[in-house]
Amino acid sequence: MIPELNNLIHALSQLPGFGRRSSERAALALVRRPETLLDNLVRALQEAREEICLCSYCGGFTTHDQDPCSLCTRSDREEGVLCVVEDSADIQMIENSGAFRGRYHALMGKLSPNRQTGVGELRVTALLHRVRQGSIHEILLALSTDLEGDATASYIAERLKGTGVKITRLAFGLPCGSGIAYADPLTLRRAVSGRFRYDEETFLEESK
């Protein structure tokens, strides 16, 4: 295989979800149709490299000419509720759900001894600064439910003691479309602990 093609395959294989075989198929498709696929990809990558950046306030994706981003500046967002996430991509995932109308703060990771990610690598200081400004009354911790996510949530909750800010976490429970037979004990324990009052009319409305 020629070095140039091998370099393209290797570059694609660094992307999440791309193994060696899928990278080979993608690379061959690109070089087979350079005008319709490869050229468009090159332009899109160049544009993304030049224009896309992280919001200096929340850490979400934006462009250099719109920093802070629209989620931080729009007046129709709920100023007093702040959703704390691990990564910039999590902001878009929550936005796509349409369930949250407040502001965001990306930590850019979580506490992880294995990855050598400590407090200094996270945007905790910036979070505390936003809280001290006095407009936030609730922080929603939308973090992973693994040990590292739980440790990060506990650390943030400890740092926020005495601020008067209400701290909440995403509800735990069974995934939509799943069943008890497929759930692990920890998921079931959290689902039982976080149970809510059943209201048929509300349930049917949310299921539409």
Image: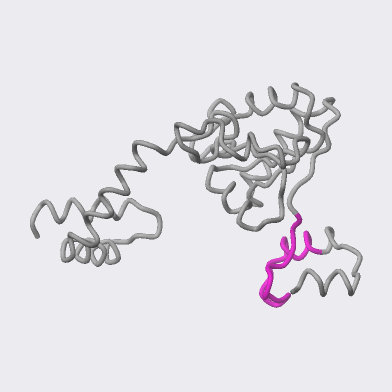
Q: Nearer the viewer, residue 39 or 113?
A: 39
Residue 43: say if magenta: no
Q: Quadrant of the N terminus?
A: bottom left
Q: Position of residue 166 (x, y in %)?
A: 83, 37
* Quadrant position of the C terminus in the picture: bottom right
Residue lying at 30% horizontally and 55% vertically, measured from the top left: 13
Left or right: 204, with 7 as reference point: right
Q: As rendered, which of 76 and 100 lies closer to the eye?
A: 76
Q: How many marks?
A: 0
Q: Is residue 71 left or right of residue 56?
A: right
The colour scheme of the drawn protein is one colour
Residue 14 horizontal/vertical position (percent): 32, 51
When asked about the image quadrant of residue 123, the answer is top right
Q: Is residue 65 above or below residue 84?
A: above
Residue at screen point 63% across, 50% down: 144
Which of the 4 image quarters holds residue 177?
A: bottom right
- Looking at the rendering, the stretch of residues picked out in magenta corresponds to 171-191
Give x and y (percent) for residue 11. 26, 50
Relative depth, front residue between 60 and 76: 76
In the image, residue 69 lies at what x, y percent? 56, 36
Q: Is residue 204 left or right of residue 19?
A: right
Q: Is residue 183 highlighted in magenta?
A: yes
Residue at point 24%, 52% (across, down) = 10
Q: Is residue 92 above or below residue 122?
A: below
Front-most of residues 186 and 167: 167
